[in-house]
Image (tube, helix red, strand yellow):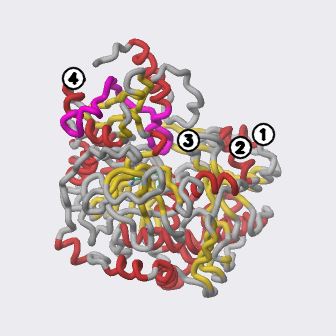
Amino acid sequence: MSDNHNTIDDLMLENRKFPPSAQFKRQALVAGTELYDEAAEDYQGFWARQAADLLTWSTDWNTICEWNLPYAKWFLGGQLNVSYNCLDRHVEAGRGDKVAFYWEGEPGDARVLTYADLLDEVQRLANALKDLGVQRGDRVNIYLPMIPEAAVAMLACARIGAAHSVVFGGFSAQSLSDRINDAEAKVLITADGGHRRGEVFPLKPAADDALVSAPTIEHVIVVRRGGNDVEMVTGRDHWYHDLIAAADPVCPAEPMDAEQLLFLLYTSGTTGKPKGIMHTTGGYLTQVAFTHKYVFDLHPDTDVFWCTADVGWVTGHSYIVYGPLANGATSVMYEGVPNFPGNDRLWAIIEKYKVTKFYTAPTAIRTFMKWGAAEPEKHDLSSLRVLGSVGEPINPEAWMWYHEHIGAGTCPVVDTWWQTETGGIMISPLPGATTTKPGSATFPLPGIGVEVVDDSGKRVEQGGGYLTLTQPWPGMLRGIWGDPQRYFDTYWSRYEGRYFAGDGCKLDDEGYLWLLGRVDDVMNVSGHRISTTEVESALVSHPAVAEAAVVGALDDTTGQAIIAYVTLRGGSDVDIAELRDHVATEIGAIAKPKTIYFTADLPKTRSGKIMRRLLRDVAEGRNLGDTTTLADASVVGELQRRAAEATVED
Ligand code: WT7
């Protein structure tokens, strides 16, 4: 434990190491340090080489990077079209019949879309958008289930230089209208409904509600998917299939400036109204193509890639749509939940399509642990080669479970740290080159500058601190839509000259990076700053525990006291005293939770992040504020009831 209280304490020690196997190295794109060495010499030159190798430009750039802190522009003077890079060039090269998406609907229906199919539909929709008055620089909102039309819609916007703003289909009418109004979008692309957990959830009615207070929308395009009844407003609303059937099939891809706005994506953050994160064309596509290729060791002729995120999140933008399509890869896209009709749905899909590269979130992995290893054992998962994780710190035991029960002990696990704001992966192993440690995202990728610092901004060589980024990167956000001051304040004001990510992070004695969760979640117990991640990982390392959420609640004696909410693995049992002792043994008495509650579920955001703010409110007996971004609101009511009854353990 560190005595230095200007940083976060470093409590956990994880010693297991997993070097890539000789067999994996032999076939790997990168098995040595060559990319790191090249980028260390000249990071801008390195990114320029990636941009030239991975993308097709209609005009070369004259300046690689113009850096006026906090604003970067990449590949100035260069022109390219994202949709051309994702579609036309593959078809022109004779790969039109290659599968772009194996799409699987939740009810069990399926579609196969080749690159030629996608190109045809994207051109038609692009022309339909133009006919509805959409021009370069306009914004188009997308509010769809996980259906191929979501990718088509994004690419059609990119083709004509309109920026898309995708709103996750699980968000409410209010969230949708807020985002439409902030972006001043002209057109909304939605669906009648989609399939989720065996039922049709209506989207168009929510969109109609949103449009009552979203006056900038002139036209609505509606995909038929749910089959539910919807009202169509004459003159405003159009069926997608009618527009596609009537549209001119040819829409040439126009060259766009490298810095043309490609999309806005709203991220809530912890307070205040959602921020419209801005991403542009050339730099973003370079970074997502590069990271998709090297982090997943892509072999486009044989790989079947599957990222389980929703297109409504940045992970879906970068690793379902733009990265894989720019690289000409074949992907799986799945509409529904992981437990319909049974808890083995994802494993059935992996077996069906022979998925080789699988990318999911720790929250999902911990849920699979809760459901038990018997579920994946029902299926042949031997096609898998690389496993990825993103979205939250992955606890070492969840990493081990993923490695053993999904990866058969042979697939490298890549824990990838990044954010909506970074556009693409920033910290991750390269699976053929990096020796991994369970729970560590390891090292910055080539071309990325990371430093851990203490409160005063002094570099930390070993131990806990705050994650900062020290140099511009091509996929970095270009600002917050309509709010430059907030952009500066949020990311660039805390440490001069550095991007502050908002995450705690520690460095071990070998320079590995261990993400410690959001800084807002760090607890202060008797003057020790303790990361929620470390205590949660200690709890999850007990064989009976599947998932844990830890918060600091006000305490008269210690400032904050550690309160833990624990979900057990199916069929397991353990008592509270044993768990508290387990934490003390794993990381020390200071981190022993004062109170532990057992719960069947934890409150999570729709993207799967544990809502510790809410658990803090519950633990401190406060009335709950806004819970609209919660995936399942009933969980909290139950926890509140139990908190009111609880007697505090000592
Ligand atoms: C925040 C960003 C990046 C796409 C999905 C989430 C957390 C993300 C990791 C990881 C530890 C992680 C961070 C980050 N996070 N990946 N591998 N290890 N933490 O995007 O919603 O913008 O969230 O997610 O706290 O700041 P996002």
- Secondary element at tag 1: helix
* Amino acid carrying mark 2 in the image: Ser
- Residue 145 rendering spot, x and y as whole percentages: 55, 49
In what quadrant of the picture does the N terminus appear? top left
Residue under the point 73% across and 64% down: 129
* Amino acid carrying mark 4 in the image: Ala
Position of residue 580 in the picture relative to residue 646 (left or right): left
Position of residue 238 in the picture relative to residue 265 (left or right): right
Q: Residues within 10 Å of mark 4 (few under 14, many from 20)?
A: few
Circle on res. 177: 2
- Residue 607 rendering spot, x and y as whole percentages: 48, 45
Q: Residues within 10 Å of mark 1 (few under 14, many from 20)?
A: few
Residue under the point 47% across and 59% down: 468
Q: Nearer the viewer, mark 3 or mark 2?
A: 3
Q: Earlier in the sequence, mark 1 or mark 2?
A: 2
Q: CA distance from mark 3 to mark 1?
A: 28 Å
Badge 3 is on which residue? Answer: 270
Residue under the point 69% across and 57% down: 484
Badge 1 is on which residue? Answer: 212
Q: Earlier in the sequence, mark 3 or mark 1?
A: 1
Badge 4 is on which residue? Answer: 577
Circles 1 and 4, Cβ within 8 Å, touching? The answer is no
Q: CA distance from mark 4 to mark 2?
A: 49 Å
Q: Earlier in the sequence, mark 4 or mark 2?
A: 2
Q: Is residue 619 above or below residue 2?
A: above
**Which residues make up the magenta segment?**
584-613
Circle on res. 145: none
Q: CA distance from mark 1 to mark 4?
A: 55 Å
